[in-house]
Amino acid sequence: MGKNSVVIGASPNFERYSYKATVRLNQYGHKVYPVGLRSGKIEGIDIITDKPQIPNVDTVTLYVGPQNQEAWKEYIFSLKPKRIIFNPGTENPEFQNEVQSKGIECVEACTLVMLSVGNY
């Protein structure tokens, strides 16, 4: 059974890593919720442009740079994820400390690599 995974910073641009991660998570059998600012589709999956409550979130995988993360913090914490993956370019020590202080696992890694080596 796959993990409920929320991709923050989802983009309909097929060259973006958030797009690739959404596709790959889906291929690996995870229930994926791409959340972004612009509407569109990622291989038939609608990008969610509001900030809905999603039950039983295992993982939030972040594709939003540190300068834009503040706008997402409250929403991310409201999802009560078990872990947050800070993909390359999203590292933010202050936010990561806040995540850990709430008892949420914090991982600095690439979601695509984690999937390919089997440790997602």
Image: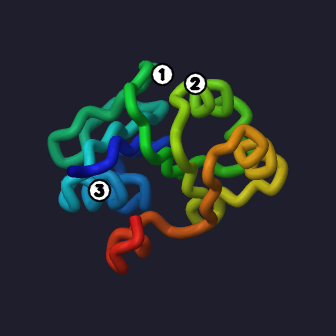
Amino acid type, callout 2: Ser
Tell me the mark number nearer the camera, choosing from 1 and 2: 2
Q: Secondary structure at mark 1?
A: loop
Tell me the mark number nearer the camera, choosing from 2 and 3: 2
Residue at x 34%, y 37% (from the top left corner) = 33
Amino acid type, callout 1: Lys
Q: Position of residue 4 (x, y in %)?
A: 34, 42
Q: Is the residue marked by circle 1 packed among few (<14), some (14-19), or many (20+) residues within 10 Å?
A: some
Work out whether mark 2 precedes mark 3 in sequence or the reverse, and give the earlier one.
3
Residue at x 72%, y 38% (from the top left corner) = 102
Q: Is the residue marked by circle 3 packed among few (<14), some (14-19), or many (20+) residues within 10 Å?
A: many
Residue at x 35%, y 69% (from the top left corner) = 115
Q: Secondary structure at mark 3?
A: helix
Q: Disc 1 designates what residue?
A: 51
Q: Which mark is residue 78?
A: 2
Tell me, what colour scheme is on the image? rainbow
Q: Position of residue 53 (x, y in %)?
A: 44, 20
The span from disc 1 to disc 3 (Cα, nearest Å) is 20 Å
The picture quadrant where one finds residue 78 is top right
Amino acid type, callout 3: Leu
User: Seen from this angle, which residue lies furthest left?
Assistant: 44
Q: Is residue 101 left or right of residue 62?
A: right
Q: Which mark is residue 25?
A: 3
* Pointer 1 with pointer 2, Cβ within 8 A: yes
Residue at x 43%, y 19% (from the top left corner) = 52
Q: Is residue 91 left or right of residue 53?
A: right
Q: Position of residue 12 (x, y in %)?
A: 33, 45
Q: Position of residue 39 (x, y in %)?
A: 35, 30
The span from disc 1 to disc 2 (Cα, nearest Å) is 10 Å
